[in-house]
Image (tube, grey):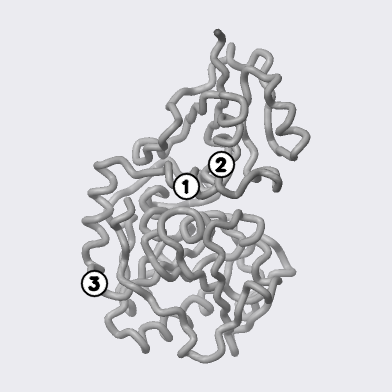
Amino acid sequence: MTTRRLFTSDYTGLANRLEGLSLSFAIKEKYGHEICLDWPELDALAIEGTTKRRMWPWDRIGAIRLNDCDEAQFASLGRYRTILQRAVYSPASLPKRHYLETAAKIRLTREYAGLLREILAKAAGRPAVGVHIRGGDFKTYDERVYDIERARHQAVPMWWYEALLRKYRAQYPDIVFLLSHSGDPARFERWRSEFDTIETSSHLAHEGAREQHLSAGHPALDLFALASCSVMIATPNSSFSHFAANALGPAARVILPPARTTAEAPEAGVLDIHGERLPLFVSAATKPEIFKLIRGDMELPKPAPLDTSWF
């Protein structure tokens, strides 16, 4: 019998590919395709139920290229022996259980799990907050005003993060910030001297990052480190922030800017949507039923020590 295979290559950033992996497992469950991954991060990741295999030219014969997938497209996939899976989003009708079940299959290798525990040991027993700042292809449009209407993929100005870091340090003097970022690492030099920070990139360099992400660290280590935090100050519209907080590891409370805020009066809100898919995270700041503005410093989510037991 001819083996049915589903191939996923390095077609987008790691978190987008992990988001799309739940669709791959839904296809495997329904139609029996073997999931074949050709990812540069597999030196650090072990994903249960998949195999490491590239797509050869002869695999493309009769294959379908899946860039998007709605209910009708999903229903037709049983006709194809080979699928090149490049979609990020799953059909809304697919059971939500696929999402967290897929996330639970994603592990660090023993070597990288041990390395990450060593890196995070500095924060043992101390309150910790994850801070994910997407730079690179996320650009700043106004240094004094953040307004989500200007562009979907825009960088949040540094003053917004700094305001939260100072508030947290004032309430929790022993706090440590787990810093994950893309873009120019030199822009964080002042933070490194002003705040107590941990960065996985200072322990292990990674040269497989996509050009637009411009990250010096290994994305798998950063992702698992952030997922060990009970509170994350995140980047809106970033699948990396979302997957770490809402899919991988224990549930986290996420702090985001509202749709519009200014340097003179920076505001922030809290989001609790563990187990939900990326589209809800992307639109969260416009949904007051799930995005709750923080009124006063005492409403800041309380940070717990890092939890590394799950990996």
The local crowd at label 1, few if under 14, some if 14 to 19, many if 20 or more residues have their Cα within 10 Å, is many
Q: Are marks 2 and 1 in contact (CB under 8 Å)?
A: yes
Lower position in the chain sequence, tag 2 or tag 1: 2
Q: Amino acid at mark 3?
A: Gly
Q: Which residue is situated farthest in the top direction here?
A: 1
Element at label 1:
helix
Q: Which residue is situated farthest in the right direction here?
A: 72
Lower position in the chain sequence, tag 3 or tag 2: 2
At which x and y percent is residue 311? 32, 50
Q: Amino acid at mark 1?
A: Ala
Q: Please, is residue 140 above or below residue 261 in the view?
A: above
At which x and y percent is residue 239? 56, 54
Label 3 – label 2 distance at C-alpha:
34 Å
Q: Nearer the viewer, residue 73 or 94?
A: 94
Question: Residue 125, which numbered label?
Answer: 3
Residue at the spot x=46%, y=57% of the render?
Answer: 244
Dividing the picture into quarters, in which one does residue 85 lie? top right
Q: Quadrant of the N terminus?
A: top right
Question: Residue 103, which numbered label?
Answer: 1
Element at label 3:
loop
Element at label 2:
helix
Label 3 – label 1 distance at C-alpha:
26 Å
Lower position in the chain sequence, tag 3 or tag 1: 1
Residue occupied by mark 2 = 22
At which x and y percent is residue 100? 50, 49
